[in-house]
Amino acid sequence: MNTDISDTQAKSYRENGFLIVRNFLSDSERQEMITAISDTVKEMGKQRIAGSNAAEIEEDDYYDHVFLQRLNLWKINPTIKKFFTDPGLATALHKLCGTEKMRIWHDQTLQKMAWANPTSWHLDNPYWSFHSRQAISIWIALDDATLQNGCLYYLPGSHKIATFENSSIDQNMAGLFEVYPEFKTIEAVPAEMKAGDAGFHNGLTAHGAGTNMTPYPRRAMTCGFMPDGSTFNGQENILSKEYCATLKIGDPLQDDAQNPVVGES
């Protein structure tokens, strides 16, 4: 993995709320990840979150035509865990976020299938069970991500404005602008990527993706990361009901089996 982050790149990330890293994965690493994801998605079947007792997916006619989504693949596939707990990645996250340690929050494969619906504007961190202005996600292109097949778009600087309010990923593409009307005047930046490139974005950076206007899938693998020391905000998200029952608001989320430290697992 190409995890060397320059001072210039780190400054750009902090200013804009996102950074695209070219050739993040080698061809062999990308193929290794694709194989691991394919095997794990097949193993999971209709279970959306790996390693949980969650019921099978209740299909939503719109949402389930935005992308194929499976979460926490790292819990049942050691290859995926290896990528997202890599010590080099830990160093890159530290340089971008200024945090001493990061933990995996959750990974997810987001595969925008042929002719899939667009992904409406949203923020990542407000969905999660902790709030942090240093939360970060990585989005790895497994296929070329283009304007035609639904690449990401970012709103630069939106992470500086956003609070922890959010909107749903639904048919209202611009629903987030009802929550943050000041976003309406920001020029969106398309994040076209070649297969193997990756984008890092802050957990409060507004982003969305277009429609896949091709007969081919646009596959991606992502992972969200939580600063060590983050505390429970009362939202269940990907945590089990049993685990949430042991927590009260303000408790640290430091279960290594649920959220391993990057670079130490």
Image: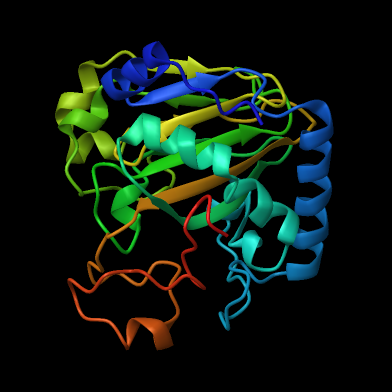
Question: Where 24 sits versus 86, above or below?
Answer: above
Q: Can residue 250 be seen in this view?
A: yes
Please tell me in which quadrant of the rendered image residue 206 appears: top left
Question: Along the line of sight, which residue is nearer the eye, 62 or 56?
Answer: 56
Quadrant position of the N terminus in the picture: top right
Image quadrant in which the C terminus is located? bottom right
User: In x, y percent, where is residue 62?
Assistant: 54, 51
Estimate the x, y position of residue 230 in percent, counting from the top left. 27, 59
Q: Position of residue 165 (x, y in %)?
A: 20, 49
Name the residue at 19% across, 41% down. 179
262 and 190: which is toward the camera = 262
Q: In which quarter of the image is residue 112?
A: top right
47 horizontally vs 153: left or right: right
Q: Against 80, is 48 above or below? A: below
- Write the residue at 70% across / 68% down: 76
Does the image show residue 173?
no
Using residue 116 as the reference point, say whether residue 13 is left or right of it: left
Q: Is residue 203 left or right of residue 142?
A: left
Q: Please give the name of the residue rendered at 43% of the width and 49% of the height, measured from the top-left corner.
A: 225
Please state which of residues 180 and 77 is positioned toward the viewer in this rendering. Answer: 77
| Percent coordinates x, y for residue 123 in the rendering | 34, 42
| Number of numbered markers | 0
Residue at figure coordinates x 57%, y 29% from the top left? 3
- Near-viewer residue (260 or 77): 260
